[in-house]
Amino acid sequence: MSDAPWLDDEEMATWLAFVGLVSRLPAALDGQVRSDADVSYFEYTVLVVLEHAEDRTMRMSDLAYLANGSLSRLSHVARRLEQEGFIRRFACPTDGRSTLAALTDAGLEKLAQAAPGHVKLVRALIFDELTRDEVRQLGALSRRLLDRIQP
Amino acid sequence: MSDAPWLDDEEMATWLAFVGLVSRLPAALDGQVRSDADVSYFEYTVLVVLEHAEDRTMRMSDLAYLANGSLSRLSHVARRLEQEGFIRRFACPTDGRSTLAALTDAGLEKLAQAAPGHVKLVRALIFDELTRDEVRQLGALSRRLLDRIQP
DNA sequence: TAGTATTTATTGAAGATTCAATGATTTGGA
DNA sequence: TCCAAATCATTGAATCTTCAATAAATACTA
């Protein structure tokens, strides 16, 4: 129980900066899509994932996974998005347990509202700060750390 | 409005991994402190920040900043933490607008409950995966990106 | 094939966070 | 000094998320 050595100074400094980033970035992203298109960042992500799916359609559980959220969270959000006409849901023809969600034209317009500002913000916050090598570094590190977390 | 070029493949791959990490890490951290000590990760962070403050005491607004949360969020959380006896609040003697929050002995015990598991998890998820050079890389990148977000 | 376990999705309730409004105090300038 | 502006913190309402329970369909196994 006590066999894990504490972090040294360099690890601690890294951890503080990294966890600060992880804590603050979501609010920054959320603010932009909310003011540009009146959706949360999670809602925006759901729409983006659907946009890139075949037939703009995807199973709820796959959608939840790719949007980095729980199925329950997605289910609540999908109800709201469907009520506002940005997605529609229907039973999966090949597996009776599944529900498919599809992006509507209105949802596509919603995306068009938020996307330019989103790209601009991601550039301003992340990529304008990094050299090409650093982009590769960040990508490689992120993929490895993500693999440790994924269930 | 359309002068921001879209992300290229390498940037997009980096962004997807990074935003996935940012989305999923909080839940992983939250799960550990919640099961070890029945506090949220934000509550845990508040206690940790207080632990390292002079006299284990700090102004609410400074505490909110260092714990990476809004003042309103802290205010709600502080009420809960105070009710459970982990912190106490009192008026600042030098500035009548300010409230000071102090960690109690019970709060210190609470920290002791969560800290070993937290260090172990942070090691398992982050530092066990990285070489010393990569720790420095991640720290340097995180600090620069954090500086772009800070208000 | 029957019966059990697993997967998929939704729901309602409980709890947490955000937003806007409020109040109190201090700061700064006329 | 006095007044307006800014700072600090709290609160309640609205919204969002999590958790546990439920239900339906499919997969597995004897």
Image (tube, coloured by chain):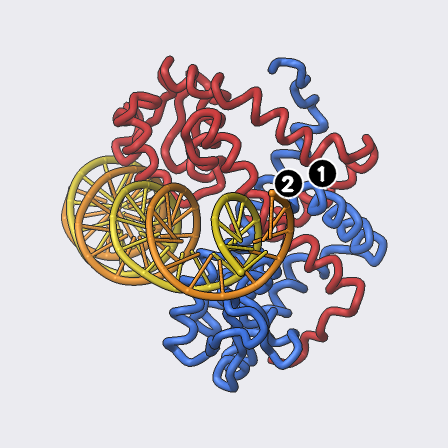
Chain colours: A red, B blue, C orange, D yellow
> From the viewer's perspective, is A79 left or right of B13?
left
Compared to residue B47, the image places residue B70 above or below, namely above
Compared to residue A107, the image places residue B29 above or below, namely below
> From the viewer's perspective, is B150 left or right of B90?
right
Q: Secondary structure at mark 2?
A: helix
Compared to residue A2, the image places residue B65 above or below, namely above
The crowding category of the residue bearing disc 1, from other C-alpha atoms within 10 Å (few below 14, some 14 to 19, many at least 20), is many
- Residue under pointer 2: B18
Residue at x-position 29% and y-position 26%: A82
Please determine if labels 1 and 2 lie on a single subunit.
Answer: no
Label 1 close to label 2 by CB (< 8 Å): yes
Which sits in the foreground, C5 or A30? A30
- Residue under pointer 1: A139
Residue at x-position 50% and y-position 23%: A114
Name the residue type under label 1. Gly
Which sits in the foreground, B58 or B130? B58
Give residue B59's quadrant in the image: bottom right
Residue A110 image position (x, y, % from top left): 42, 20
Residue B135 image position (x, y, % from top left): 79, 55
Measure how far apart labels 1 and 2 are at the Cα level.
7 Å
Residue A65 image position (x, y, % from top left): 46, 39
Residue at x-position 64% and y-position 74%: B53
